[in-house]
Amino acid sequence: MGFAVSVLNFLALAFVWVLGALAALVLILYIIDRTQRSDAIRRNYPVIGRFRHIFSTLGEFFRQYFFAMDREELPFNRAQRDWVEHAANGEGNTIAFGSTRNLGVPGTAIFTNAPFPPLNDQFASSEPMMIGPRARVPYMAPSFFNISGMSYGALSKPAVRALSLGAAKAGIWLSTGEGGCAPHHLEGGCDVIMQIGTAKYGVRDAEGKLSEEKLRELAALPQIKMFELKLAQGAKPGKCGILPAEKVNAEIAAIRGIPEGTASISPNRHIEAGDWGELLDMIAHIRNASGKPVGIKTVFGTTEAWEPFFEEVVKRGEDAAPDFITVDGGEGGTGAAPMPLMDLVGLPIREALPLMVDLRDKYGLHERIRIIASGKLVNPSDVAWAICAGADFVTSARGFMSSLGCIQALKCNKNTCPTGITTHDPKLQRGLVVEEKFEKVARYAKQIISEVETIAHSVGVAEPRLMRRRHVRIVCDDGRSKPMNEIYPTVLSPRWDRK
């Protein structure tokens, strides 16, 4: 009995101490809030005004898990994320009872099924396609679906390793992003596309200019299949890479050729290319020095701005053309970008891609320049639409981040990514087990390819690259759909029918 009384007395005393501590804390916070001058809410409503910030911070997470419907969220909704997760886990993506997709939303793509689709022995997998027939070492790209540019530095070491191993297993290429080619990109043995950003990371000299010596060293690696000259990306057209100082460790600094611990901010364009002629000169220089195909990555603004580019190519001859053009939509993602650029600048991929394809075909360059589509294309319907629109290849970055386990926490620029994908904190990286995740990367890629082939067979063609704009209808503002080839009629070279 005496022991019980002692315990009760101790608990009562502890409770009083806790209440006293809480009261003291509230008093301290009250004084701080009442006297500070930066936040009007906290100054007028001490202590309780702090809950506004807490609820605002937690709101995005509560909406994601409790309040938002399956197809409501941005940048990717739950239905899209669930599809990627199921594909990466090797689970079935069949559903029951009916689609949750609202087919009346303007812009929705609806594929037109054929009354007599090909039988099992009448369709085939996609064939490899050559890029850069005028280069000394052309690239026979095996897959129409590949991994878009994500730099080591923006991504963690285990994330890049998993992508490299997964790409090799799936038979697809991996772009380095503008941060240079790291050993981790090469580790898995996959095909690698070396992206050259405006800061020339990985191929720069002491002054930040293009180093032909380093370019030749990289080109000598058999895994490096092509070079992509990045002009712009969808999330930040007119402003290139931003890597926070806390992410620039000794290894990343050595790979990029920049000072350790210093924020890495790239120029907004290549200083060597101030007009279309200088850009074509730069492309020719890199192709001659490397022997590999060279293309550009860009964001489409207006047809009028790009007409002179194709006119200059025709004037110089097809040998002067880039081997490919990667079109990134204005809705593209990145680790860090100014909100006005991410939200307001650059055409979305649904409009930009058909326009770029039509310009290429108008100038008779269909067989010379391959078009690669990039920008929020993560599900089979997205990829199939892009191929119908005229893309030869499709690349995805955030789709593969989701296959690694990305939960859309929106912490990419803060070095606090909870899944270990975009952080250099070893404690957080520990959650990303490369030996498990690379399998998910490969399964996701294979599932995309398989289901795009299924869509192609459904519309009545043997393989995806035979799909045309007439095979997809787009829902318009009045709720009715129109064939894509009526919305985007093409001016075609006589050698090719893209309709």
Image: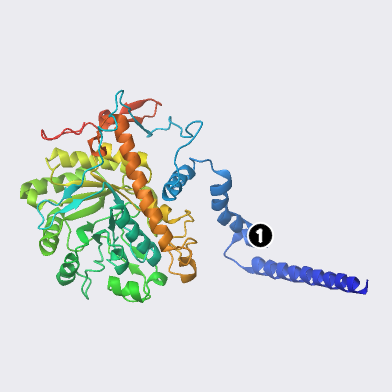
Residue 485's image quarter? top left
The residue at the point 14 percent across, 54 percent down is 138
Q: Quadrant of the rendered structure where residue 497 is? A: top left
Q: Is residue 368 left or right of residue 242?
A: left
Q: Nearer the viewer, residue 460 or 331?
A: 460
Pointer 1 residue? 44
Residue 137 coordinates in the image, percent (x, y): 12, 57
In the image, 452: left or right of 417? left
- Residue located 80% across and 72% down the image: 14
Work out whether residue 342 can be spotted.
no
Which quadrant is home to the C terminus? top left
Q: Classify mark 1: helix, strand or loop.
A: helix
Q: Which amino acid lies under the numbered mark 1 shown in the image of this protein?
A: Asn
Which residue is farthest top?
A: 115
Q: Nearer the viewer, residue 273 or 380?
A: 380
Residue depicted at 32% across the width and 76% down the height: 259
Farthest right residue in view:
1
Q: Position of residue 482 (x, y in %)?
A: 32, 27
Instruction: Say which residue appears at 47% left-offset and 33% top-offset.
Output: 99
Q: For mark 1, does the 10 Å Cα neighbourhood hold few (<14), some (14 to 19), or many (20 or more) residues?
A: few
